[in-house]
């Protein structure tokens, strides 16, 4: 006879899944933001070879399904390069790369939105490329990109649910486990979905707040 | 001194500067006149290292702008005011002015911002010190642009048609500031269409035509009845300007 009732232990299970999903989301967001912005800077300075390589990688990553990328890393890498990857490692690599590709696209257009003439002005006043990047380009690009980035991250949060298929015990996987045991799919998936919803709303809320702050000190018209 | 020797610049097949020689000594105000497209802006952009020369040499106090290692010294000695202001839109007036002093001259921020406020005060903008460029009128923006240049305590000011985007009232505000700078002995290279004003502040007038410096004369000689302005090409230019 199977035990189909919910227990208080299930809440702990859900909390565990939730924290795994959240941790993976945060880690891959940070890595993806860093790598994607770095790629955009490489492109902005037209660094030979690297700029082309980066463009191709981003192109491939954003035009193929995340699930396929995940399988490629998790099953393909061990078979091809004899590197063993754990499910969590495969998840971090894949999701970070995917986030990076989209951050790259957003960062490139954000940087392109900045008038070249002010960059020239800063150079004429003696600022180095690095100082221009830090003081002129980054703050304005951030104000411009924060909206699209928030949208991206809300989406990437949902995408983390894919990693359950290679055995990472995230929120979706816990949902699966609970569902199989309780045979109450409507309740289980409604609760799991609700938790994703709350997380997504928190991301969106944080993004909106940050956007307000980044733009409050840029009272420029037309953007 | 700024020394321009045999400078050539082409964009594709179009030669825009065709062997320019020009010296600007300390304390001089040299006005550059010339019709639109004659290469005035390009010459300024060559002086501040924004364009690569295709020939010749420009030095500022003996620092060669074509040598990357010397360019930063050359740039510390000169400062540019731009036709379209080119302010940093995400920074207030004070921040615009203090940025380069802090980052390049390594002046402590507090000091640099206090200096910026003093400069803004001197151009009648103390009330707008914390406004962003988008909240300022054109004339106010250009005054911030001038303060930004002056904050670097440059030996040479490069000014490229800095009033041509302004309406007459704002223009006179900005020109009044230049008159004072000239009076104080500031060295300036002044690209302009304000001929009467150029006459009052310039030590020399040069005339650029299709990428060549066709006239380089002390102001009085330039405006003498039989001087530079008597040349047909320049007479034509001047009469057209005076009509506008
Ligand atoms: N970056 C550029 N690429 C191609 N042509 C340019 C560029 N900058 C200027 N030119 C051309 O060079 C000529 C001189 O321009 P410019 O120096 O701006 O003249 P001015 O300031 O006297 O009006 C013009 O014909 C202009 O079209
Ligand atoms: Mg011009």
Image (cartoon, grey):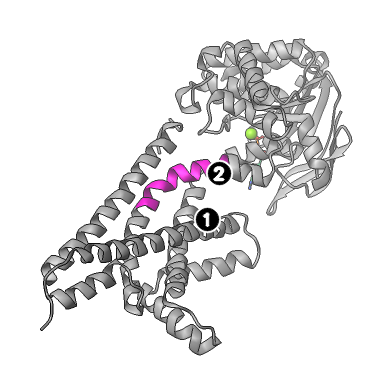
Question: Is A149 included in the stretch rendered in magenta?
Answer: yes
Residue situated furthest bottom in the rendering: A79
Q: Are dots 2 and 1 on a single chain?
A: yes
The residue beneath circle 1 is A37
Mark 2 or mark 1, earlier in chain: 1
Q: Which mark is residue A137?
A: 2
Q: Is residue A116 above or below residue A29?
A: above
**Viewer-proximal residue, B175 or B88?**
B88
- Position of residue A190 measured from the top left corner of the image (x, y, whole percent): 15, 63
**Viewer-proximal residue, A81 or B39?**
A81
Q: Is mark 2 within 8 Å of ligand 1?
A: no
Tell me what residue is drawn at x 44 percent, y 55 percent: A106
Spatial CA distance of label 2 from label 1 is: 12 Å
**Viewer-proximal residue, B231 or A216?**
A216
Q: Is residue A60 above or below residue A209?
A: below
Which quadrant holds residue A132?
Answer: top right
Q: Bounds of the magenta span?
A: A136-150
Dot 2 surroundings within 10 Å: few (below 14), some, or many (20 or more)?
A: many
Q: Nearer the viewer, mark 2 or mark 1?
A: 1
Q: Decide if residue A163 is on the left or right side of residue B242.
A: left
Quadrant in which the N terminus of chain B is drawn:
top right
Please report, as a chain letter, where disc 2 is located. A
**Viewer-proximal residue, A119 or B212?**
A119
Question: Is B160 included in the stretch rendered in magenta?
Answer: no
Tell me what residue is drawn at x 29 percent, y 66 percent: A171
- Position of residue A36 measured from the top left corner of the image (x, y, whole percent): 50, 59
Please report, as a chain letter, where disc 1 is located. A
Dot 1: element: helix
Dot 1 surroundings within 10 Å: few (below 14), some, or many (20 or more)?
A: many
Quadrant of picture, ligand 1: top right
Tell me what residue is drawn at x 58 percent, y 23 percent: B94
């Amino acid at each position: 006879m199977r035990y189909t009732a919910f227990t208080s232990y299930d809440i702990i299970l859900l909390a565990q899944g939730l924290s795994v999903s959240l941790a993976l989301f945060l880690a891959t967001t940070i890595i993806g933001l860093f790598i994607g912005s770095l790629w955009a800077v490489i492109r902005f300075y037209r660094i030979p070879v690297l700029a082309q390589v980066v463009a191709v990688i981003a192109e491939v990553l954003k035009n193929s399904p995340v699930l396929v990328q995940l399988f490629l890393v998790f099953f393909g890498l061990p078979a091809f390069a004899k590197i063993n990857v754990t499910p969590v490692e495969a998840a971090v690599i894949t999701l970070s790369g995917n986030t990076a590709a989209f951050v790259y696209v957003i960062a490139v257009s954000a940087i392109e939105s900045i008038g070249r003439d002010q960059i020239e002005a800063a150079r004429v006043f003696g600022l180095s490329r690095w100082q221009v990047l830090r003081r002129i380009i980054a703050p304005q690009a951030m104000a411009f990109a924060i909206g699209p980035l928030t949208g991206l991250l809300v989406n990437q949060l949902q995408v983390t649910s894919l990693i359950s298929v290679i055995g990472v015990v995230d929120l979706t996987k816990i949902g699966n486990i609970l569902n199989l045991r309780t045979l109450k799919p409507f309740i289980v998936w409604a609760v799991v979905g609700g938790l994703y919803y709350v997380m997504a709303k928190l991301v969106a809320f944080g993004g909106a707040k940050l956007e307000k702050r980044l733009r409050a000190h840029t009272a420029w018209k037309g953007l | 001194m700024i020394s321009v020797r045999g400078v050539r610049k082409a964009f594709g097949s179009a030669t825009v500067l065709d062997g320019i020689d020009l010296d600007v000594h300390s304390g001089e105000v040299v006005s550059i006149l010339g019709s639109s497209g004659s290469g005035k802006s390009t010459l300024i952009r060559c002086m501040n290292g924004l364009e690569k020369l295709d020939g010749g040499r420009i030095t500022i106090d003996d620092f060669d702008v074509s040598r990357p290692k010397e360019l930063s010294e050359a740039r510390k000695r000169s400062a540019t005011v731009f036709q379209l202001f080119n302010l940093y839109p995400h920074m207030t007036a004070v921040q615009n002015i203090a940025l380069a002093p802090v980052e390049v001259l390594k002046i402590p921020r507090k000091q640099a911002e206090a200096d910026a406020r003093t400069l803004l005060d001197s151009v009648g903008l103390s009330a707008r010190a914390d406004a962003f460029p988008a909240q300022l009128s054109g004339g106010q923006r250009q005054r911030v642009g001038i303060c930004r240049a002056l904050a670097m305590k440059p030996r040479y000011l490069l000014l490229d048609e800095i009033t041509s985007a302004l309406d007459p009232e704002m223009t006179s505000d900005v020109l009044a500031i230049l008159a004072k700078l000239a009076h104080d002995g500031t060295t300036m290279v002044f690209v302009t269409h304000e001929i009467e004003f150029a006459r009052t502040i310039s030590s020399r007038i040069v005339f650029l035509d299709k990428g060549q410096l066709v006239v380089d004369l002390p102001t009085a000689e330039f405006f003498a009845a039989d001087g530079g302005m008597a040349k047909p090409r320049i007479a034509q230019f001047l009469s057209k300007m005076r009509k506008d």
